[in-house]
Image (spheres, grey):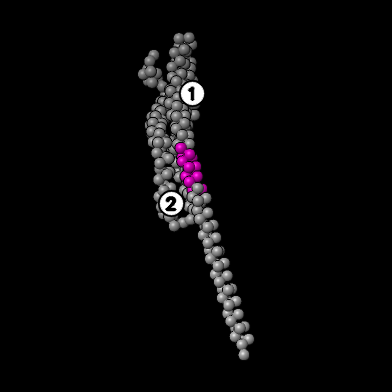
Amino acid sequence: MDFMQYWQISDMVTKTLFFLLLALSILSWVTGIIRVLQSRKLAANVADDLNQQIQVKQAEMIAADATTRRLVTEQILLKHIGRYRFASERGLPILGTTAAIAPFIGLFGTVWGIFHALHNIGMSGQAGLGQVAGPVGEALIMTGLGIAVAIPAVVFYNLAVRINRRVMYHANDRAHDLLARSAEMVVTQQPLTDSKSTVTQDSLAKGMHSNTADVQQVTHYHSSAASQP
């Protein structure tokens, strides 16, 4: 008995499970291919995109000091890395769910098929090995279908997770470089600020010393004028 004959004697439950497995298979293949392609594209462009986002934001804060730019840079990096993680995980729940439930759906179809076959054998009154082995063996087709649906979903899931780890590696690596540049700008600007403060303090000290000298000269002049007859 081939598959077409098995399909003709199958009941509505078995046919429903078959179409469910077929829908899960198509969905997992389409989702898996799209997810892998998008993850590979994201892994190739994530570093440049992150650098571009930071450059655009720093151009808007050209008048801010280095400390402020560093804080804003950290917030932007955290925001965009979270977005990259969310974008890279789209479709993974579908693949994981398909890989988890497809074998059990096939197993349920097998159990139901065996029950249906044994019921028909009991109704016919023929209990020979040939009458039992054929229908029971054909009921195992559903288990094979469930495994055939689950295997590609598992492969696509693991492949996408592997590529997503590379995406996060490139994003974090570029983020650390950008933060290091921000720290260097803070360290570079600090001596300039200290030197400006020193110059300002020296100017104030010189101004106070000059004022003191002027006061002393005025006081001496008044004293001299008072001592004359």
Residue ID at (46%, 23%): 147
Q: Residue furthest front?
A: 229
Corner quadrant of residue 14 = top left
Where is residue 166 drawn, in percent x and y?
46, 34
- Assess whether residue 209 is covered by the magenta stretch: no
Q: Give the crowd class for mark 2: few <14, some 14-19, many >=20 residues within 10 Å.
A: some
Q: Residue furthest left?
A: 4
Q: Split into 4 quadrants, where in the image is the N terminus? A: top left
Q: Amino acid at mark 1?
A: Leu
Placement of 187 over or under 215, stated as above or below: above
In the depicted view, which residue is nearer to us: 134 or 44?
44
Residue ID at (48%, 55%): 65
Q: Residue furthest bottom?
A: 229
Residue 107 has which mark? 1
Q: Which residue is mark 2?
A: 58
Placement of 63 over or under 18, stated as above or below: below
Placement of 159 over or under 189, stated as above or below: above
Residue 85 visible to the viewer: no
Magenta segment boundaries in residue numbering: 170-183
* Mark in the foreground, 1 or 2: 2
Residue ID at (55%, 71%): 210
- Number of labels in the image equals 2
Residue ID at (45%, 11%): 131
In the depicted view, which residue is nearer to us: 127 or 198?
198
